[in-house]
Amino acid sequence: MLAEIHEGKTDDMTVRLVRSIAELAYAKHGDLGRTDDLGLIIHTRLETFLDGAWYEATAHVLGSKLKAKKQYQAIKWTKQIVMIDFRVSDLCDVFGVEGLCYEYWWASAAMRAIGKGSVVKWDRTKTPSLLYKDTGVNTLCFYLYDERNSKGRGFLTRFGTWIDETQKLEKIDATGADEIHFAQLTPNPDVQEYPVWNRETKSIGRGVGATNFGVGSFSLAGFKSEHGFMSEPFKPNFVILCAASGCDDGDLGSL
């Protein structure tokens, strides 16, 4: 979810858009080649685990440092993958990036309104500082577009194409081998019960929480179908790329 200080614009669609901007920023500017920032929890120390924040927070929740130490020992011998290289300042930076991404979205929304003929006024003494006047603009266009986005269900690819999840079942074979699963953002999640693994009883139990992500799925055949229109225009460019890089025609055939 977004902080309420962000102009109060925290609906699900805005959360998704801001999160997408943030993820693209991480993909573009982050160091995705790093392999030392994650590792097994067994390689950590209680006093420095998550920059000491875990020890402090767990002691506060359980009521004593002794209970926190026992909890740490109970999970240290599991095979959990945790953040090895982490500082509390990193968390602050993440919220800072979120704020900048929100401002980026807000600026793009303003450009959208200006492009459709809205009168825009900037007043630093008011919140929000950017004020719109849609007089003379066909507000129905905004309404229909926003309504379509808010009701949209499916998988949005980075190519800008959309795969409708409601149609995927028609294209999946009997074994389900054509189906792929992925994590999808759950904006503004509600607190509710979820199935969780109980380490003591070695069974599935129930837990309460608000999950940031859920599991989505779509058909690979559907994905291929939706992107098929790009295959022919892509091949000539791929041949040029092969010629420049020295690959042979077999690479084109494998495409």
Image: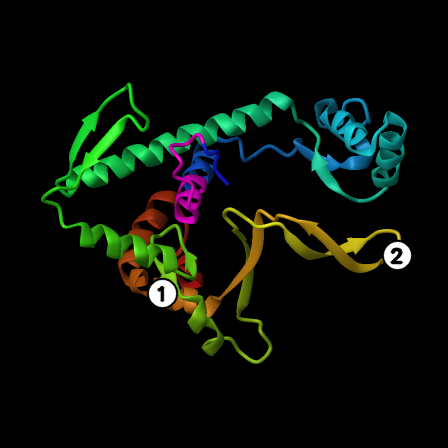
Q: Is residue 180 above or below residue 7?
A: below
The residue lying at 24 percent from left, 35 percent from top is 110
Q: Circle 1 sits in a helix, a strand or a loop, which is it? A: helix
Neighbours of disc 2 within 10 Å: few (<14), some (14-19), many (20+): few
- The image position of residue 63, as x and y in percent, is 83, 30
**Frontmost residue, 147 versus 252:** 147
Q: Is 166 on the left-hand or right-hand side of 71?
A: left
**Frontmost residue, 215 versus 211:** 211
The residue lying at 23 percent from left, 50 percent from top is 142
**Frontmost residue, 242 versus 143:** 143
What is the magenta range? 5-19
Mark 1 vs mark 2: which is more N-terminal? Answer: 2
Q: Circle 2 sits in a helix, a strand or a loop, which is it? A: loop
The amino acid beneath tag 1 is Glu
Q: Residue furthest front?
A: 126
Residue 55, located in which quarter of the rendered image? top right
- The image position of residue 207, as x and y in percent, is 73, 53
The amino acid beneath tag 2 is Thr
Residue 103, located in which quarter of the rendered image? top left
Quadrant containing the C terminus is bottom left
Residue receiving disc 2: 201
Gap between marks 1 and 2, in whole Å? 46 Å
Residue receiving disc 1: 226
